[in-house]
Amino acid sequence: MEDLELIFKKVREAYEQFSTYSQEQVDKIFKAAALAANENRISLAKLAHQETSMGIVEDKILKNHFASEFIFNKYRNLQTVGTFYENKALGIQKVYEPIGIIGAVIPTTNPTSTAIFKCLMALKTRNAIVISPHPGAKNCTIAAAKVVLEAAVKAGAPKDIIAWVESPSLDNTSYVMKNADIILATGGPGMVQAAYSSGTPAIGVGAGNAPAIIDESANLDVATSSIIQSNTFDNGVVCATENSLVILDSVYEKTIELFKKKNTYVVTSEEEKNKFRKTMFKEGKYGLLNADLVGRSALKVAELVGIKVPETTRFIIVEASSAEHDEPLAHEKLSTYVAAYRVKTFAEAIEVSKKILLMGAGHTASLWCDVDKHKDKLELFKGLNPGRLLVNSPSSLGGVGDMYNFGLDPSMTLGCGTHGKNSFSQNVGPLNLLNVKTVAERRENMQWMRLPERIYHKFGSLQYAFEDLREWNIKRVYIVTDKVINQLYGKRITEQLDNLKITYTVFDGVEPNPMLSTTKKGAEEMRKFTPDLIIGFGGGSSMDAAKLMWLMYENDGEEIDFKDLAVTFADIRKRIVRYPTTGRKAKMLCIPTTSGTGSEVTPFSVITDDETHTKYPLADYSLTPNMAIIDPELTMTIPKGATNAPALDALTHCIEAYVSVMATDYTDSYAVQGAKNIFGFLPSAYFNGKEDVEARAKVMDGAAFAGISFANAFLGLVHSLSHKVGGYHNVIHGAANAILLPHIIRYNAACVIEGGKQTYFSQFGVQNSMEKYAQLAKELGLKGKTNEQLVDALIEEVQNLTKEVELHTSFKDYGVDEKNFQESLEKMSEDAFDDQCTGANPRYPLIEDIKQIYLDAYYGNPIKKFS
């Protein structure tokens, strides 16, 4: 207790200092802390999993990402200091003032993400915080707090603004509660009740036990996919996860069959049901969950309960009839199994849900229904007591906000209101003052089609396109290229500029893998030259380097933190770091001389960090060129070795964009045409490139179509793995893509068959990669009676093309040392999981899966056929 007295004394002094800070100081600290938490999300997730044995590492990474990026994005511009409202006519001012010391109780189920969230909330509101971790998760909780504290102090916060209990116990937690100014409690019912009984104002959250009503008007395919997706997210430990399904009789059998097709085991026998009832709770006490079942996979749950299920089982449904308190199956589970109730009418569904909510009042409920056609059912649903009433959304991910509805505030602390004996009913945030009930319907992210302002193509278009520079009134041009391209084609550019009497200079120092130091050097020269047009000329490396130089040049000479630009984002609209605006000083023109990257039409740039030799794919629409000139005349003399690998890179762009979770009808059309061009004309362009103008033009157009497609739909796991194997072992990017693409087509298409995880993105309602690959195969004229046969044909077609243009089909064949590869495998796989491209892949990869794909690709293992 003497230690805690000293801690509170220091924290109180830190608070007194912090409470005087300006909004600018607070926001600087808030951003630094969010970035630090984001950067450490993987190590903290691994630590949490090691210590608690609950959940899934990859999902904990996503929760840490959510707790840093989404929280920062939501509140980055929120005023929390000083006068925020003034009405002179009424004579009213409202002023924000911090509370003091927050006593934060952290659960074992979400130890790092909740700690990050609560620390960020404290920093944004100029409060101090003392954390009391769960004894079973103290090391990872304290590690998360230390990460945030170190970053906050470095950004100017008082050194004791965040503190924690080193040896958690009931007595120490009680001390924290009684000596704090407000309690932010997340945990079991007993802990929350203790918070409210402590005599200190408290914001606590009660038990979750969310029912999900499935109406006969629901999209059953999306509903079943989403519910599985939700319950397998971190193995069900999010308190908003569905615990019971209340299904209308008219669609009950069809719904259950859909679940079964998606790797669900349905318990129907009383013998197996009783095994669940007997195992669920400790000492037979309702509400006191058996921790061995919490956060476990369906296979592990089955093993512990004592039933046999298929090896592909991801989710378990236990049929139930009673929703009364004395039925164990009606209670909260925090795992990968749910109870299922069959009801005759929607009114009965509401009544059953009300009974279930007596064991989780005020928390969350969800409805699967066509609410536009059945507004009456929505009104009945709104009569339930939870603070979160989710419509057509996976409950765990929908309940935390900002992932499946963007008006529901993101939070890791979900209030249950007075029904759950809580003081708040909302998703807890900085300004929660009222008990408010929220109805949140699922919504999709906005998408767009963004292209260069002008795209010139056809043989000989270079000369005509340059006439536009008169219209733009261009006076000074800075050309970015490499020495070989400059020697071969440089005069083609400079002659046009000479004819237009435009002043220019040439920077030809770009490497095959452009280094950060090179772009900095080019940007510095650019500032001295002051161009009003920048031309990226050559392969993808030259255009990528030109884009980053442009960005640096446009930033008024201020230093840009490259690590900030390279921060991985889960959603491009919510990224922590915003890119500077381009186009104020100069326009960007890209002219490719190869047929591969599509950089001339994309907002992407791949740059290598000199210090770590890590390749960073930068992505922001501020990097989109104003004009692209796609002139196949510039590719007629390029050698075979610069034709095959870049074109396979472009083919990968087409196929990955086509199955991306962000794909749309707009992007699909470009992806399909690009793939047709490359499959149809690459062999001739490779073997007869000096004579076959049509083949060169078709492949070059195909690369541009691919660029347009993936610029707006993004890429996937092939590029994630390719970036890392290129960085670690110097495998040519396009060649690496050619090796990996068949393996990952098989991996993605087999998602449902193998019990894989569906990627989390609001547009992506149903796992459809098998169908998409099959449709692409049809577009390419491939034969097959079933989707499986068509996917097999597509894989074979990619492999045949790779061999035809004389590329290898394994990393070993490229001379990658086996020992070095094996030694780097673990880190390379983890880095690939964290690559920017992974998020748009249709199958959410596990790190162990990535390791296996790397091994198969290294040794060139045969790809198992579906048919």
Image (spheres, rainbow, N blue to C red):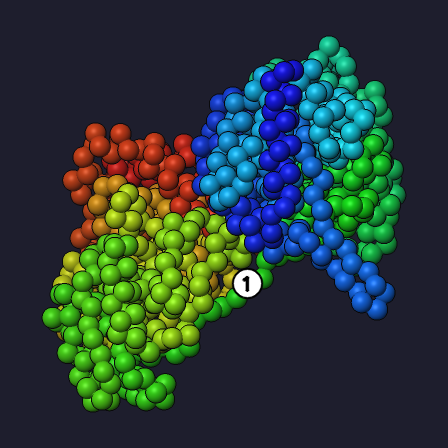
Question: Horizontal and vertical percent for residue 567?
Answer: 43, 49
Can residue 770 be seen by looking at this rendering? no
The residue indicated by pointer 1 is 447
Task: Please give the name of the residue rendered at 31% of the width and 33% of the height, measured from the top-left corner.
Answer: 825
Task: Please give the name of the residue rendered at 42% of the width and 35% of the height, measured from the top-left corner.
Answer: 847
Can residue 16 be seen by looking at this rendering? yes
Question: Horizontal and vertical percent for residue 127?
Answer: 65, 39
Question: Horizontal and vertical percent for residue 446?
Answer: 58, 62
Left or right for 40, reference 242: left
Query: For the N terminus, which image quadrant?
Result: top right
Task: Please give the name of the residue rendered at 27% of the width and 78% of the height, measured from the top-left corner.
Answer: 477
Asked where in the image residue 121 lies, by quadrant, the reply is: top right
Under mark 1, the amino acid is Gln
Left or right for 573, reference 695: right
User: 462 above or below 692?
Assistant: below
User: 692 above or below 676?
Assistant: below
Asked where in the image residue 385 lies, by quadrant, the reply is: top right
User: 847 above or below 533?
Assistant: above
Query: For the C terminus, which image quadrant?
Result: top left
Task: Please give the name of the residue rendered at 18% of the width and 62% of the height, measured from the top-left corner.
Answer: 509
Q: Residue furthest top?
A: 283
Left or right for 232, reference 275: left
Q: Nearer the viewer, residue 122 or 20?
A: 20
Q: Nearer the viewer, residue 709 or 168?
A: 168
Q: Nearer the viewer, residue 289 or 393?
A: 289
Classify mark 1: helix, strand or loop.
loop
